[in-house]
Image (cartoon, helix red, strand yellow):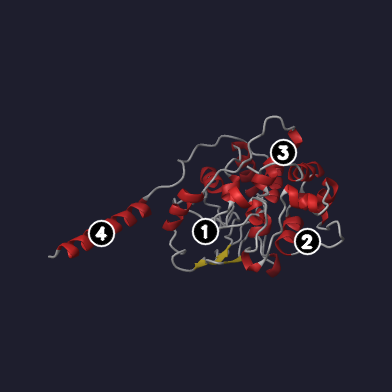
Amino acid sequence: MSPLVRLGLAAAVMASAGLVAIIAWPIGRPLQSFHIEGDVNRGAYLARASGCIACHTDFAKGGAPLAGGVELDTPFGTLYSPNLTTDPDHGIGGWTVEEFARAVRQGVSPDGQPYYPAFPYPFYANFTDQDIADLWAAWQTVPPVAEPSKEQDMAFPFNQRWGLKLWRAAFLEPPPTYPVPGKDDVWNRGRLLVEGATHCAACHTGRNLVGARKSDTEHFKGSDSLPGGDKAPAIDFGTLQQRGWTVDDLVYALRTGVMPDGDVFGGAMGEVVNYGTSFLTEDDRKAMAIYLLDVHDGG
């Protein structure tokens, strides 16, 4: 056997071993026990704020609440939101609260597989144990729907979930929701909502060729590549100020979907308002507006 052939075989063996190692590579932190009583009402509120209703309910086709089926057309293929009802076979009725916590905060399924980051779990990473307990309590009130989730239709190589492990290693980052010293409680509440639960950066921040947010350079600078060809405008402080937005304007828009010029939000933002921010308290909408309209780096 020639040296060149031996070298080729060695390279093939190493590549195969590397692939096997990646596929077997465990992700996520171990499950932790939960012994906290959840508040159903607070959980339902947090679910609204987090966009769960809008993303997992196919309103266009009269779908049942949280039964999934919402289509997301991405540059990498088509994704469908899964069934999150309490059905034990087709939903999450067979999950434990610990598995639910890991899915929400870490983006890892009960069988240890990574979720596609279209599920905005990176923004939920700092949810407290009480948040998780509240969400779980609310989820137990959702009627089961015996409808299987649609299979994700991703193009190769994006249909290889093991590749998401590499994506996570390269791009997964915790949300900047921690309180900032020197800022008051209202500002920090706005930061917690904007950078966390309501995950504004998921749509309003540009992404690179593999779908990771350009948080360092384009945070809130807008995006032209939303699912389905939709676009999201810049909502950074400078742009909002330049366009004449005030705190009152933004609070009103988050409640009604009506902008200062009398036009209304359409597309994805219309859904965000209809099924999310319109259900928030006026205080929370004001906190979000104050945070967005203050000078900060978003990080």
- Secondary element under disc 4, as helix, strand or loop, is helix
Task: Examine the rendering and report whether any part of residue 113 can be seen.
Answer: no
User: Which one is earlier in the sequence, the residue at label 3 or at label 2?
Assistant: 3
Q: Report the residue marked by disc 2.
A: 265
> Which residue is located at x 81 percent, y 52 percent?
255
Q: Which mark is residue 189?
A: 3
Tag nearer the camera, 1 or 4: 4
The Cα atoms of the two marked residues, 2 and 1, are separated by 37 Å
Tag nearer the camera, 4 or 2: 4
The Cα atoms of the two marked residues, 3 and 2, are separated by 24 Å
> Which residue is located at x 70 percent, y 68 percent?
60
The Cα atoms of the two marked residues, 4 and 2, are separated by 54 Å
The amino acid pointed to by label 2 is Phe
Q: Position of residue 78 (x, y in %)?
A: 55, 68
The amino acid pointed to by label 3 is Arg
Q: Which mark is residue 11?
A: 4
Tag nearer the camera, 2 or 1: 2
In the image: residue 100, left or right of residue 50: left
In the image: residue 28, left or right of residue 259: left
> Which residue is located at x 46 percent, y 41 percent?
29
